[in-house]
Image (cartoon, helix red, strand yellow):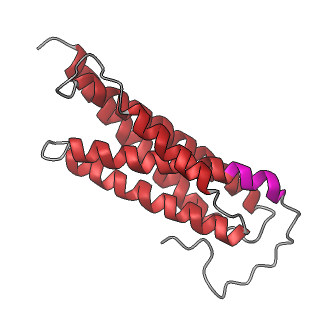
């Protein structure tokens, strides 16, 4: 599902000039964020395996990884090279984010899960914004598939709803006395 436009599809829309220099920077910034998001989602799903949220988070982590591959496919289609230093920076920032203890040194704090769900939700919000931006560009750039971008927007919106539900339930468990 990573392909952006089906092979053999004729498009008669006129291609307007796309500012590929700025679009390349924009997409590489989102690639860095996506790299961090894939790692954060995978880590969170791993820490939650075996509980009620584990399977849901594993599914979201898999979708986020697929979305990163789709972003790379879009970049290739647009002739935008992935900037390795940005990918590495995104991964390094995610690893640095794990160093915060959230009040505990040895064991995982329940606050960590609340904060990770918030961070993941914010990342998905950013991804949805990128898909919406590309959807607008698709109106004048025939290299982008508007229908596929609509699907990606809907999936991101579903991820946001699910993450918000998980976040609110975790916040209640964390902050409300039993």
Q: Which residues are magenta?
A: 19-26
Residue 118 forms part of the magenta stretch: no
Q: Nearer the viewer, residue 20 or 93?
A: 93
Tell me if 48 is positioned left or right of 132 in this view. Answer: left
Q: Nearer the viewer, residue 111 or 17?
A: 111
Tell me if 93 is positioned left or right of 166 in this view. Answer: right
Whether 80 is drawn above or below 136: the answer is below
Q: Judge whether residue 30 can be spotted in this image.
A: yes
Whether 49 is drawn above or below 73: the answer is above
Which residue in the rendered view is the most extreme toward the top?
Answer: 177
Q: Nearer the viewer, residue 84 or 38?
A: 84
x 35%, y 58%: residue: 62
Q: Judge whether residue 145 can be spotted in this image.
A: no
Tell me if 80 is positioned left or right of 173 in this view. Answer: right
Whether 119 is drawn above or below 88: the answer is above
Q: Quadrant of the C terminus?
A: top left
Spot occupied by residue 25 in the image (x, y as percentages of width and height): 72, 50
Spot occupied by residue 5 in the image (x, y as percentages of width and height): 63, 75
Spot occupied by residue 102 in the image (x, y as percentages of width and height): 30, 20
x 60%, y 49%: residue: 86
Whether 67 is drawn above or below 178: the answer is below
x 20%, y 42%: residue: 48
- Dividing the picture into quarters, in which one does residue 64 lie? bottom left
Spot occupied by residue 167 in the image (x, y as percentages of width and height): 33, 31
Q: Main secondary structure of the magenta part?
A: helix
């Amino acid at each position: 599902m990573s392909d952006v436009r089906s092979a053999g599809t004729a498009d008669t829309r006129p291609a307007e000039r796309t500012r590929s220099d700025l679009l390349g920077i924009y997409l590489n910034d989102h690639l860095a964020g996506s790299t961090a998001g894939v790692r954060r989602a995978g880590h969170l799903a791993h820490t939650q395996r075996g509980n009620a949220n584990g399977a849901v988070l594993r599914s979201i982590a898999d979708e986020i990884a697929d979305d990163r591959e789709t972003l790379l496919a879009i970049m290739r289609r647009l002739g935008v090279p992935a900037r390795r230093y940005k990918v590495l920076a995104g991964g390094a920032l995610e690893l640095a984010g794990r160093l915060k203890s959230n009040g505990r040194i040895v064991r995982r704090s329940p606050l960590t899960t609340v904060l990770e769900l918030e961070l993941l939700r914010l990342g998905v919000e950013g991804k949805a914004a990128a898909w919406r931006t590309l959807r607008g560009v698709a109106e004048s750039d025939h290299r982008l598939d508007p229908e596929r971008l609509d699907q990606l927007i809907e999936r991101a919106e579903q991820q946001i709803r699910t993450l918000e539900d998980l976040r609110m339930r975790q916040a209640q468990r964390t902050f409300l006395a039993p």
